Image (cartoon, rainbow, N blue to C red):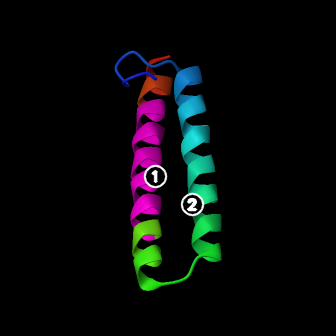
Amino acid sequence: MSNGSHATLEDLDRQIATARENIRQLTEQATAQSGAADEDLNADRIAEQQDELDRLLKLRAELAKKA
């Protein structure tokens, strides 16, 4: 996986797709589970993936400006 400094648009697009898929799967898991502990854990995991997605989208926008 690229670290962002040498990433290509194609690399970032793959990572963005992965993060979006992870968020989708985590949301489905959260819907199927119940309990406060599960809800907190799922919310934390979704938030982490959303942060990663936001970071990747920002990197992609910056790289696209340079291209």
Height in image: 43 above or below 45? below
Q: Pointer 2: what residue? A: 26
Residue 58, x across and y down, in percent: 42, 39
* Tag of residue 62: none
Is label 1 in contact with label 2 (beta carbons under 8 Å)? yes
* Residue in front for this viewpoint, 51 or 9: 51
Residue visible at 63% across and 57% down in the picture: 24
* Residue in front for this viewpoint, 3 or 34: 34
The magenta region covers 43-61
Q: Amino acid at mark 1?
A: Gln
Q: Residue 32 appears in which quarter of the rendering?
A: bottom right
Residue 60 included in the magenta stretch of the image: yes
Mark 1 and mark 2: Cα distance apart in space: 9 Å
Residue 12, x across and y down, in percent: 52, 29
Residue visible at 57% across and 60% down in the picture: 26
Height in image: 45 above or below 36? above
Element at label 2: helix
Residue visible at 54% across and 23% down in the picture: 11
Q: Pointer 1: what residue? A: 49
